Structure formats: C-alpha cells, structure tokens
Amino acid sequence: MASAILAYADSFALVASKYIPPTGALSEQYSKTDGTPLSAADLTWSYAAVLTMFDARARTAAESWGASSLTLPSTCSGGETSTVTFRVTVYTVWGGSTSF
C-alpha cells in the first residue's frame, strides 16, 4: 500500500515538472488546459512546498520553520478550546470604510 501511495504522489510531481519553465520559476497556479502560469509567480510557499515534498520523499525530517517554541501535549483529549479574534477593516470603492 505504501508503494502505491508513493507512486500516486510521485505522479503529481511528474505532471507539475512538465510545466516548470527552464528558469525554474514556480507559479501558484497553472492552467488545466495548457499548463501556462495563471497567477502569482515566485511565491515563497511554492518553493517551500517543493522543498517539503523533496524532504518527505527522501524521508528526511525537515527543520523547524520557526515554531520550535511550541509544544504538543503527550495525549489527545477533548474539550480544549481556543478563542481567536480578528479585526477587519473593509474599504469601499467609494472611499468609505467600516471595521468589525
């Protein structure tokens, strides 16, 4: 089963590699019909995703990307909650704004 999953994942990388230009520039999205880049190019997370894929494929543990001070509990338990608050300001085309 593991080899089938690995082959399936590798097939995605092989398809993507067909559309990477000679410069190696990665785009966020590619056209389904002809493979041309559709959106933002050279995004950091595009390259990070490829490097993470290579590490996973090589079964190499990746270094921390800045969350080294976080700790995970040793057991899972239910009932924990976290509160997150977002402050959003919306600007209209007419020059007005509102916050919520």
Image (cartoon, helix red, strand yellow):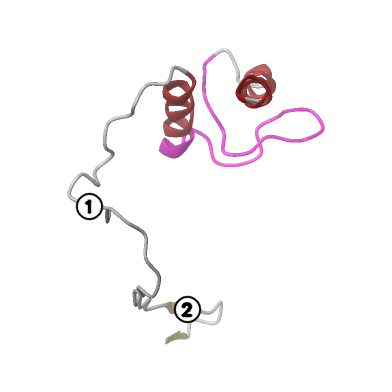
Compared with 26, 85 (above or below) is below
SS label for mark 2:
strand
Q: Quadrant of the C terminus?
A: bottom left
The residue carrying mark 2 is: 90
Other-residue count near label 2 (Cα within 10 Å), few / some / many at <14 / 14–19 / ≥20: few
Other-residue count near label 1 (Cα within 10 Å), few / some / many at <14 / 14–19 / ≥20: few
Compared with 15, 29 (above or below) is below
Image spot of residue 61 (x, y percent): 34, 27
> Is 3 on the left or on the right of 100, as rendered?
right
62 within the magenta span: no
Amino acid type shown at disc 1: Leu
Answer whether labels 2 and 1 touch (C-beta < 8 Å).
no
Q: What range of the chain is rendered magenta?
A: 23-46
The residue carrying mark 1 is: 70
Residue extending furthest toward the right:
33
Image spot of residue 36 (x, y percent): 70, 29
Quadrant of res 40: top right
